[in-house]
Image (cartoon, helix red, strand yellow):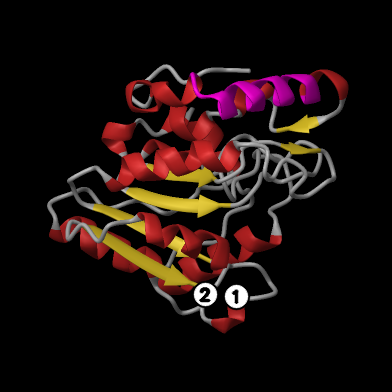
Amino acid sequence: MSMIDNDWLVPLKKEFSKPYYKDLFEFVKNEYSTTVVYPPADDIFNAFALTPLKDVKVVILGQDPYHGDGQAHGLCFSVKPDVEIPPSLVNIYKELHDDCGCYIPDNGYLTKWAKQGVLLLNTVLTVRAHQANSHRGIGWEEFTDAAIRILDQQDRPMVFLLWGRPAQMKKSMLHRNPKHLILEAPHPSPLSAYRGFFGCKHFSQTNEFLKANGLEPIDWQIENRAEQKTEE
């Protein structure tokens, strides 16, 4: 299991020595050795690795990783480039198109967002293949709650995008720092997107807030795979 080795390590370090984390580590290690678990073990902490704490400008909370073959790679809502775009992300792209004029790309690989300071954090970081929520309640929530508390303590402009009830339940952990903007909407799932996710304009509101606070706005456009390869 990969470890965190950037500026997240110091504030999160005390979590690693707590009894719950030792139990979590042993459980997850055993799961990886006895069954198929997603994401790949080296990708578990990708959200932290790709978005150092000092760079976080936007926080998007997910639930547990995608449980289909080859989908999850440690960022909420994101899938690897050669995987079909999941329904919730299709709806996120639709809202981005209507809100910011982004074209809808041919892939769901959101690493570009993470590298710009968008923390794409699931509240549960692993899952058994084809068993949604199978690692819920084993300790990940306590760990990611600690990360949310660390974010809440950052006294600088930051946007929290809380989509759906599970994410909105974390709002009680946020102490209304006037430098933080909290935006809420229904989940982008096909089951709920029409209840208010479509038309929420969270992406343009985020960028307006960042610009008003002297920060570079997020380039939300995910390029088609051919363009990504050209840039690499």
Q: What element carries label 2?
A: loop
- Amino acid carrying label 1: it is Ala
Q: Does the magenta stretch include residue 215?
A: no
Is there CB contact under 8 Å for labels 2 and 1? yes
In the image, residue 185 sits, relative to residue 141, either above or below, namely below
Inspect this view and state whether residue 67 appears.
Answer: yes
Q: Residue at x 46, y 26 (%)?
A: 15
- Is most of the magenta stretch helix, strand or loop? helix
Q: Which mark is residue 163?
A: none
Q: Mark 2 points at which residue?
A: 197
Q: With 179 as the anchor, is 13 left or right in this view?
A: right
Bounds of the magenta segment = 17-31
In the image, residue 60 sits, relative to residue 208, either above or below, namely above
Q: Is mark 1 on a helix, strand or loop?
A: helix
Q: Which residue lies furthest to the bottom in this view?
A: 195
Q: With 59 as the anchor, is 126 left or right in this view?
A: right
Q: Residue at x 20, y 51 (%)?
A: 157
Q: Along the line of sight, which residue is nearer the eye, 188 or 35?
A: 35
Q: Position of residue 78 (x, y in %)?
A: 59, 46
Inspect this view and state whether residue 113 appears.
Answer: no
Q: Which residue is drawn at 52% across and 77% down?
A: 198
Q: Where is residue 200 in the image (x, y as percent from the top left)?
A: 43, 76
Q: Quadrant of the image for the N terminus? A: top right
Instruction: Give the Cα separation between the discs numbered 2 and 1.
Output: 5 Å
Q: Which mark is residue 193?
A: 1
Q: Position of residue 145 (x, y in %)?
A: 46, 44
Q: With 63 as the anchor, is 128 left or right in this view?
A: right
Q: Residue at x 51, y 36 (%)?
A: 143
Q: Is residue 21 magenta?
A: yes
Q: Residues within 10 Å of mark 1 (few under 14, many from 20)?
A: many
- Amino acid carrying label 2: it is Phe
Residue 130 image-quadrant placement: top right
